[in-house]
Amino acid sequence: MKLITVNFLTCAVKGCKTAAASYPLHFRDAELELQELEFQPEFILNIIPRIDWEALRVMANELGFPKIPDTKPEGDALKDEQLLKELHRLLLETQVVEGRLCCGNCGHEYMIKEGIANFLLPSHLGLIFLSVKLVLDFADPAQSKYTKV
Amino acid sequence: MFQPWQTFPRLIRNRMKSRMSMKCTNKLPVIFPPLVIRYYRFFSCRTHPPSSIFQLQYGDSVLTLRQPWPIVEQFLKGLEPGSVGLDVGCGNGKYLAVNREVFIVASDRSANLAQIAQKHQPHSTIIADILHLPHPDSFFDFAISIAVVHHLSTPERRVQAIREILRTLKPATEDSPGGRALIYAWALEQKSSRRGWDKGDPQDIMVPWVMKGTTSADAPSNEPKVFHRFYHLYKESELQQDINKAGGHVLESGYEKDNWWAIATRINPGSP
């Protein structure tokens, strides 16, 4: 999973969405890997405005990347190709292959396997939703009319 | 004395094999469809049967045959470079290859498909449920969900799925039009298609998909496997109604290749 992805993720549990602590998610036991990708300065330039810089810094610090600027680079700073290359390496080329992503609000941990994070909730977290649905589904007689194929 | 297994050993063996490969859930839809639909409803938010009951080896044949649809391509190519969006229910990720200037977080419920979709650069793939998307509110510039909502088996869940997609979109402000979502669903009105359904036919059905040439170790090769998947076939204007119920506003809609499609935005940040 590319590190940039974490900037666009939060906890899958409904109640956590409004809690500030659920963003960004935190890596645990992350196993990093570098997967080379063609460097496209325009892509990085276009994507920088959409990055939550504070969340990126939190993540980079937790993973032990020290060289992140304190503030989002703007204006002339963006003409520095070295900076863009470093961001390209950090955001797109650095991949988390194994590990966990942890929600700072509810503490739930999402497994990352073979570079893919799994956000399917275990049954107990979706249970309230499920049980309400079940009661509604079976209580409503209009719902039970199904046709054979 | 006549022994059939001596005279036709291959025939008998093949019979046995096919019997063994037919798991009980495989046969249920043919015998008693309502029970299977019940099953899907019982395991709410399941779009695919659980893998422990029936091993789905998606990826190669069943879901990759369809060509990219022109409207989807047009939608994706019309996005501004640097846009960030979602592909909810990305399948094998065929739409991830359309535009490399935007960033897409693709998600699918099937781990096998997510694995296949992962190869498309520069995007990213995760495993997630359409009813519980792990994305922040009011953030994304666009979202596509192609041939996904029709797999949910109750009207409430279909509306809930659309509401969940709309929730992630940027709301419109005075300066910007806000995020847009493109949603596709299979149409009931497809008289000219191979399936030939039309107005008046049942909308909640189990559709058999024949998989040829499976290479999985536990199945006999060369024997087509049949999977039944739940579909809710959308009537004309039903998709628009669902979007309205979910707190969305339909900008454009239409019919393309046996599917209804709609491009929607959020009406206001409060509702979805």
Image: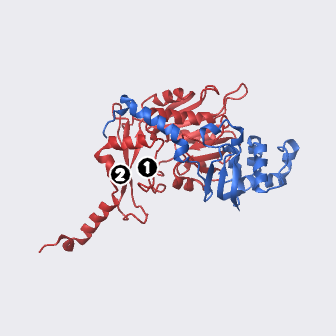
Chain colours: A blue, B red
Marks 1,2: beta carbons within 8 A: yes
Same chain for the residues at labels 1 and 2, yes or no?
A: yes
Disc 1 packing (10 Å; few <14; some 14–19; many ≥20): some
- Out of A125 and A55, give the one closest to the viewer: A125
Q: Label 2: how many residues lie within 10 Å, few (<14), some (14-19) or many (20+)?
A: some
Q: Which residue is mark 2?
A: B25
Residue A132 visible in the displayed image: yes
* Horizontal arrangement in the rendering, residue A145 relative to residue B91 (left or right): left
Where in the figure is residue A44, as x and y percent of width and height? 75, 48
Identify the residue under disc 1.
Answer: B49
Q: Three-letter amino acid code at disc 2?
A: Thr
**Amino acid of disc 1:** Pro
Q: Determine the chain carrying the residue at label 2.
A: B
Question: In terms of image quadrants, where is residue B197?
Answer: top left
Q: Earlier in the sequence, mark 1 or mark 2?
A: 2
Residue at point 64% right, 50% down?
Answer: B123
